[in-house]
Amino acid sequence: MIQRTVSSRLLAAALLLAPAAALADAAQDFSAHCAACHGDHRLGGTGPALIPETLGRVRGIDQVITHGRAQTQMPGFAEQLTGDQIAELVAFVQAPLAERPVWTADDIAASRAMTGDYSPAAAPVFDADPMNITLVVETGDHHVSVLDGDTLTVLDRFPTPFAVHGGPKFSPDGRYVFIMSRDGWVQKYDIWSLREVGRVRAGLNSRNIAMSHDGKWLAVANYLPQTLTILSTETLEAAKVIDVTARDGRPSRVSAVYQAPERQSFILALKDAPEIWEVATDPQAGPFHDGYVHTYQKDGTEAFGAQEGLFARRRIPVEEPLDDFFFDPGYKNLIGTNREGTKGVVINLTSGGKVAELPLPGMPHLGSGITWDRNGHKVMATPHLNEGVLSVIDMTDWSLVRQIPTHGPGFFLRSHETSPHVWTDVFFGPHKDEVHIIDKQTLEIVKTLNPAPGKTVAHTEFTRDGRYALVSVWEDDGAVIVYDARTLEEVKRLPMRKPSGKYNVWNKITFSDGTSH
Ligand code: DHE
């Protein structure tokens, strides 16, 4: 009996120790095989950061370690590592780091790498209309294809940092584009010269980027560290790194940052605190009264903190942290949703007050929202990540106009001023191969496309004149399918490696009514 108790205790101890021992072995394997490219601390080097914050959504890590990743520097380790060792390595890279990593202004400066032999071309090095260039992000092998929107041919295809996410941001003249990866790299590419200008690591795990109204500054919203990095668009040097700390002193991740051109500011929401921030991109701005930073004047009285000038910051308190948000066309109001995605709120950005609550359950994906004119009213529409429905809201009185049932939850919406239709994908579920075409006035589905049965088909972008609509077959051996936007007939298929978002220069820099931020 005693013997059995001792041995079962030993067994229990052995079981408790097993994961730790496995992790220790995995740490050694990591040092031996991975650290040279992915960094001693898993924060990335020539290879991407391998931490849960960046790997969260990556599937099949074991397959990548076993077989490598085609057309990248990542080799397979099937010869050197056993199946158990690979499984332990997967657990190791998915485990949180013991200490939260730091990434200072000096680290940002040291990471900056400008292309040595780059010199800007005096004029575009191609004949195509530079305003009708459309970029296709190919996530399969981390490249961007530069498409001529008239001839629909590829002018250039260049490598990007690992795992680009969110919309690239163009300079206001459409010449340069800035592309961000989830592991914090920002790449600058000169469309006229078809050359990379340089890149810099602005954070370790980044959310998205925003261009200032005058094209001088690029804000990088970070999860890790909890900062907003503001880069000079000319040199890629960090002009300011703002610690994102809530009014109660707690650090917070940034849900997202967008430019508000009419307000000459960046607007961001804190993911872990109920605050919206406005950061001035106008040197003459202010004073922004920062209602929550109380300072004490010489006579002992309390005063509201006020900041003015470039990058002055203003806090707007809200009831709950906002996870996802969108703006009305004049950037007077912000439409946001809470973390649970159960309701929407409209916040007036000037007064900071709540204007309305919106019935938006089922995780509205407001970052993909678009607006258009219907019966003399501006309406906005958003897909929902948890429900097969599209919500259409009247922006004059914030009433719900219609919930349009779709064949499953969708991710992206797009239209164009010249198009009578909204294109929306069904990203999740058995109908992930479908794209619905919806009449902007009747709000009825007029056609459902199914161009690649069984494959995920998603994200639409229009060419400058709205003549063509481009849709991604989101697979490694995928394609961009070009449709005639009027007849809804297929025109051409361009083979691409897991193409995701597509971005037309003109539609983006003119804030076309059919495009999201
Ligand atoms: Fe995105 C844009 C957030 C998952 C592909 N996504 C955005 C934006 C935000 C956002 C805030 C707007 C940024 C901008 O353009 O400036 N995305 C989120 C999430 O919170 C979510 C649900 C979870 C996460 O992992 O962060 C998420 N997104 C995904 C994906 O799984 C997608 C499909 C594949 C991927 O690349 O990770 C994806 N998101 C995209 C794309 C855009 C985007 C292609 C740009 C759309 C556009 O037309 O502008």
Image (tube, rainbow, N blue to C red):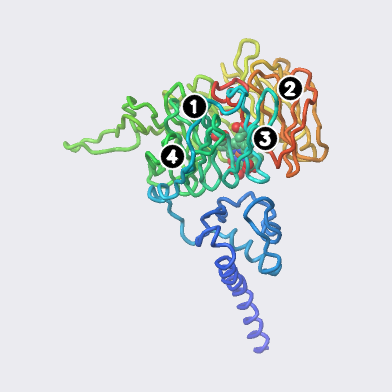
Q: Earlier in the sequence, mark 1 or mark 3?
A: 1
Q: Earlier in the sequence, mark 4 or mark 2?
A: 4
Mark 3 in CB contact with mark 2 (< 8 angstroms): no
Residue found 52% across the figure and 55% down from its top: 45
Mark 2 in CB contact with mark 1 (< 8 angstroms): no
Q: Label 2 amino acid?
A: Ile
Question: Which residue matches tag 1?
Answer: 122
Q: Label 1 amino acid?
A: Ala
- From this viewpoint, is residue 365 visible? no
- From this viewpoint, is residue 48 visible? yes
Question: Which residue matches tag 3?
Answer: 411
Picture layout, residue 77 above or below residue 12: above
Q: CA distance from mark 4 to mark 3?
A: 31 Å
Label 4: how many Cα within 10 Å (few below 14, some 14–19, many 20+)? many
Is the CB atom of the residue marked by disc 3 within 8 angstroms of ligand 1's nearest atom? yes
Secondary structure of the residue carrying numbered label 2:
strand
Q: CA distance from mark 4 to mark 2?
A: 41 Å
Quarter in which the C terminus is drawn? top right
Residue 133 vs residue 365, the one in the foreground: 133
Question: Which residue matches tag 4?
Answer: 236
Quarter of the displayed picture in which ligand 1 can be seen: top right
Is the CB atom of the residue marked by disc 2 within 8 angstroms of ligand 1's nearest atom? no
In the figure, is residue 321 to the left or right of 457? left
Question: Which residue matches tag 2?
Answer: 438
